[in-house]
Image (cartoon, rainbow, N blue to C red):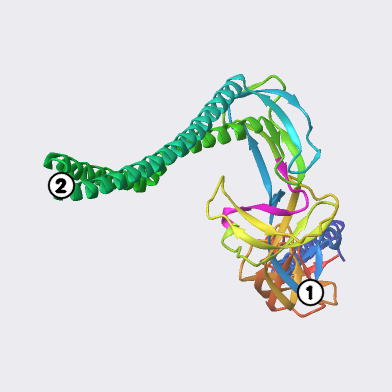
Amino acid sequence: MQTILESQNNDTNAKKTTVIIAIATVISCSIFAFYFWSNNSDNASNIDLDDLVIATVKSGNLIQDVRAPGNLIAKNRQWLSARVSAKVTRRLLEPGAIVTPESIILQLSSPELMQQYKRVQIDHKVAQAQLEALKETQKAENQKKQADVKLLDIENQQAIADASVKKQLIGKKIIPLYQYNEAILREKKLTLELEIARFELQQLPRLQASLLNVEEAKVEQQLLQLTLLSEQVERLNVRAQMHGVLQSIAVEEGQEVVKGTTLARVADQKNLKAELRIQESQARDIQIGQTVEIDTRRSKINGIVSRIDPAVVNGTVTIDVELPKELPSEARPDLRVNGIVEIKRLENVLLLDKPAHWQDQKSVFLFKLTGDSQATRTKVAIGDTSTNSIQLLSGLAKGEQVIMSDTSNFQQYPTLTLN
């Protein structure tokens, strides 16, 4: 028979045993849960699907391109400059005006030029008058020389006849010998004078031509100077010199300008090209003949690279793009445009849309979606890339989906659970 004290001790021991068992159970469960969590944490992680960017592998063409800003430029443009120091008196046209080669844009004035022009005009008239006078003098001189030759010829014939008569008379001793000798000497003298006169008449045209050439050269010199000044006077009326549109005027009425000052610019609005400014690091991929798409923000124009500037200016290389003759209505000189130069085209390849955080590399691990709300870490070989697309060489098939969000914090997990 138990006593009351023994019964109380037994109850206390039972309670202690129950508490110990409960504590052991909790500890065991905690250890098991920690072990289970630890094992699963090495293999998977939970991610909210709504926070991910999912891309589908598709088949298509990958186009590598280079994008650059630029402007439309007139192939034919004319910078009009002052040919002399002058003053702007009138602006007859304003920018935007349609012009022809004869259209007068500005009128200039130069009193000094006009005075010089008038002085040279007078000098030219004097030189011409002197030339005409020389021609008349030479004509008269030639006629006089011919008359002198004829007169000497007559006198020489008379001397020959006189010497012949006196020779007969001296044989008959009718006249003294000295008279016959005088006749012979006179005949020789006139014969010699006639020969000299004939020689001078023969040489006269050559001498006259030399003198005439000198005077004609003076006239030509004056005429050349007059022509130059006449052109300078004419250029006081600043003409467009081509068909096109007046783009700008750089001077105002009343302004004094010196020789070489830029006055205005005219451009052919129908014959345009595009100039693109390519970043130096991308210019090495540009080649003549590559196709280019020019975006005017209203229309798109297809062109071809026609020239690559060899110089680098401010970190960019300028290229020229040949455009078709028929251009949209908004196309005009100096219009800002964007250009896309096609560097390389790959037909019918596997593609993924390129995310903003993408960094070019040859291979990468992407999480491929499976049918059980999970994503498996998959190694993918990467080929070429473009602005918007990535070429896939291996690791994925057409139609498969992958996570394109930044998963760098989950690369240690072989699988991801998508909630």
Which residue is pictured at 77% across the width and 48% down the height? 269
Locate residue 90: give its quadrant: top right
In the rendered view, tell whether residue 119 sits above or below residue 372: above
In the rendered view, tell whether residue 123 sits above or below residue 71: above
x then y, percent, for residue 273: 71, 54
- Type of amino acid at the residue the image marks with label 1: Val
In the image, residue 269 lies in the stretch drawn in magenta: yes
Of the numbered discs 1 and 2, the one sitting upstream in the chain is 1
Locate residue 178: give its quadrant: top left
Mark 1 — residue?
57
Task: Give, as a single range, the part of the protein colored magenta.
Answer: 266-281
Viewer can see residue 9: no
Instruction: Using residue 98 as the reference point, say whether residue 197 is left or right of it.
Output: left
- Magenta stretch prevailing secondary structure: strand
- Type of amino acid at the residue the image marks with label 2: Ile
Front residue (pair 379, 64): 64
Front residue (pair 215, 302): 215
SS at mark 2 in the image: helix
Quadrant including the C terminus: bottom right
In the drawing, what numbered circle is on residue 170? 2
Locate residue 209: give its quadrant: top left
